[in-house]
Image (cartoon, grey):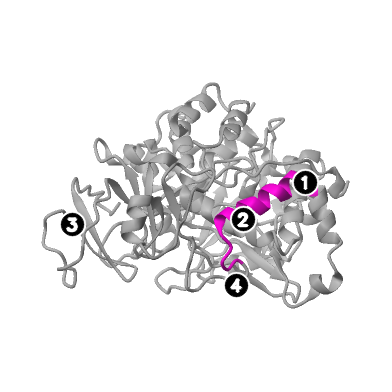
């Protein structure tokens, strides 16, 4: 996935201390220091690890929502006006995210879910403590918001509420140099587009947009809007399946391509999206075909490798297989035909190895035994293809998640979701001294609670020389569950992979907003 899109038909990747030392044809001289290195046959095709630029990871314990109507914009499905949202999303997440025993299980499970779907980099998980401290969870999957690596400049996915509401402060924030990944124009109506138009400043072609803005979704934009994004150097994250499920349409990708906007992929969350990037690539192929064949398979693979690396300014370290790059690698079964189609066609059962920073984290027992013989990997995990092992142990393990196994996390979450009212009641009856002893971490669910951080710009719209609100606004106070925990239903823990989750596929088949034939075609690609 370099700039020339070179494909090596029979190649070898040499890795040392988390860095790629050499990529070249099999049979060529090994690099210095690898004269006695044992080469492990992968039995498949080797790609850079998949980089995801949009996800709400904590919510990926929740099952796919059977969307009941076609919504015009984000505010119509995400607040108190939609009782299902409180019962099925915010209510359950409050229960899980504030329970000191369940919050670590959420973190462990959703990170493993990203991993077993080929994702090696995603957006991070924020934690709050009862002392008011906030930090990012650092796990085995890379975190765009906390990289601890000078070659991987950290991005932000939240801004202070004052910056979100003031054009001057928002533009100043963009000029600080960090990439900002923010929701933009979420929906299909004029209210959604108004959130973009509010970035227009007084003066000719003056916008609160720079190369540091990465807009998420952009479903409400028109062709001329993509030209504005491109002219100001901004880029975009595309989440086609979630867009189609909620709004019955996705972004005008043909217009985005014509304008020259660089795109990356994000699976959004399992409530209304894919289980991971391996699935989202398939949804993107179908959406591209429905729009007239906008992208080739190579273009789509770019959106999960090279493009996000360039957008984050990581291209020297990630997104391609090259000497000196960080050793984030995935392997899928099969080594014939078109290399890009092979990846998009791959089912999760075809994913045979995931390596992050040189450490084998997931794969077939044979490859894991060869590459991580001392890892004490977990096997026999329900929801994974047969014969797979997961290695989540790390020397710098987060103390909150620590030694919690994936199997134990799945067990705890399965029980808690099956009896959410009881789970909430047990947490409420816990002794006060146990609730308050020492730092007590919880998930920072910014989409639910007002925390002083925003996920989207909320600038006033300039019309006829005056400022007007740029559409309805949802905040944490409006997103809660008015009826209390007793109104919560019994839920099923969402499965780790699509091939092993018949309920997910059945729900997908009944989604009302998908184009005719889309669900059946996607299920065929997934299984």
Q: Earlier in the sequence, mark 4 or mark 3?
A: 3
Front residue of 107/281: it is 107
Q: Residue at position x 53%, y 43% from top?
A: 383
Q: Main secondary structure of the magenta part?
A: helix
Q: In x, y percent, where is residue 133?
A: 69, 75
For label 2, the residue is 409
Task: Please give the label number shown on residue 524.
Answer: none
Q: Are marks 3 and 1 in contact (CB under 8 Å)?
A: no
For label 4, the residue is 399
For label 3, the residue is 24
Q: Are marks 1 and 2 in contact (CB under 8 Å)?
A: no
Q: Secondary structure at mark 4?
A: loop
Q: In x, y percent, where is residue 373?
A: 35, 62
Q: Secondary structure at mark 2?
A: helix
Say if the magenta span includes residue 404: yes
Say if the magenta span includes residue 258: no
Q: Secondary structure at mark 3?
A: strand
Give the distance between the C-alpha atoms of the residues marked 4 and 1, in whole angstroms: 27 Å
Q: Is residue 265 visible?
A: yes
Is disc 3 surrounded by few (<14), some (14 to 19) or many (20+) residues within 10 Å? some
């Amino acid at each position: 996935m370099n700039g020339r899109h070179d494909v090596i038909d029979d190649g070898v990747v040499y890795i040392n201390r988390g860095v790629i030392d050499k990529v070249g044809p099999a049979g060529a001289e090994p690099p210095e220091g690898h004269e006695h290195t044992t080469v492990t046959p992968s039995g498949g095709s080797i790609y850079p690890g998949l980089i995801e630029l949009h996800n709400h990871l904590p919510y990926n314990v929740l099952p796919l929502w059977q969307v009941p109507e076609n919504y015009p914009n984000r505010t119509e499905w995400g607040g108190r006006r939609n009782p299902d949202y409180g019962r099925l999303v915010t209510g359950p997440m409050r229960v899980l995210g504030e329970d000191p025993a369940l919050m670590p299980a959420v973190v462990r499970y959703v990170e493993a879910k990203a991993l077993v779907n080929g994702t090696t980099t995603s957006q991070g998980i924020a934690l709050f403590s009862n002392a008011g401290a906030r930090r990012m969870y650092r796990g085995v999957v890379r975190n765009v918001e906390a990289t601890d690596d000078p070659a991987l400049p950290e991005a932000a996915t939240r801004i202070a509420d004052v910056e979100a509401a003031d054009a001057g402060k928002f533009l100043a924030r963009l000029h600080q140099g960090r990439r900002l990944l923010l929701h933009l124009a979420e929906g299909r109506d004029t209210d959604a587009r108004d959130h973009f138009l509010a970035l227009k400043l007084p003066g000719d072609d003056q916008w609160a947009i720079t190369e540091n803005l990465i807009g998420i979704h952009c479903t409400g934009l028109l062709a001329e809007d993509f030209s504005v994004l491109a002219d100001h150097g901004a880029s975009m994250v595309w989440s086609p399946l979630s867009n189609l499920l909620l709004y019955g349409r996705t972004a005008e990708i043909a217009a985005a391509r014509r304008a020259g906007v660089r795109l990356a992929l994000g699976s959004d969350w399992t409530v209304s999206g894919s289980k991971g990037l391996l699935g989202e690539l398939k949804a993107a192929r179908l959406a591209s075909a429905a729009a007239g064949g906008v992208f080739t398979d190579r273009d789509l693979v770019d959106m999960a490798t090279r493009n996000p690396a360039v957008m984050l300014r990581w291209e020297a370290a990630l997104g391609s297989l090259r000497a000196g790059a960080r050793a984030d690698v995935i392997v899928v079964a099969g080594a014939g035909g078109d290399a890009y189609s092979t990846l998009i066609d791959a089912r999760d059962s075809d994913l045979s190895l995931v390596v992050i920073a040189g450490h084998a984290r997931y794969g077939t027992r044979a490859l894991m035994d060869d590459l991580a013989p001392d890892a004490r990997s977990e096997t026999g995990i329900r929801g994974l293809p047969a014969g797979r092992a997961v290695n989540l142990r790390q020397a710098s393990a987060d103390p909150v998640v620590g030694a919690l196994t994936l199997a134990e996390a799945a067990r705890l979450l399965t029980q808690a979701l099956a009896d959410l009212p009881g789970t909430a009641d047990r947490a409420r009856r816990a002794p006060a001294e146990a609730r308050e002893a020492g730092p007590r971490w919880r998930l920072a669910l910014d989409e639910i609670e007002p925390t002083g951080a925003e996920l989207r710009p909320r600038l006033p719209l300039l019309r006829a020389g005056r400022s007007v609100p740029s559409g309805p606004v949802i905040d944490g106070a409006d997103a809660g569950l008015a009826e209390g925990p007793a109104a919560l239903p019994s839920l099923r823990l969402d499965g780790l992979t699509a091939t092993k989750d018949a309920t997910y596929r059945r729900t997908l088949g009944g989604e009302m907003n998908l184009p005719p034939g889309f669900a059946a075609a996607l299920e065929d690609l997934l299984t």
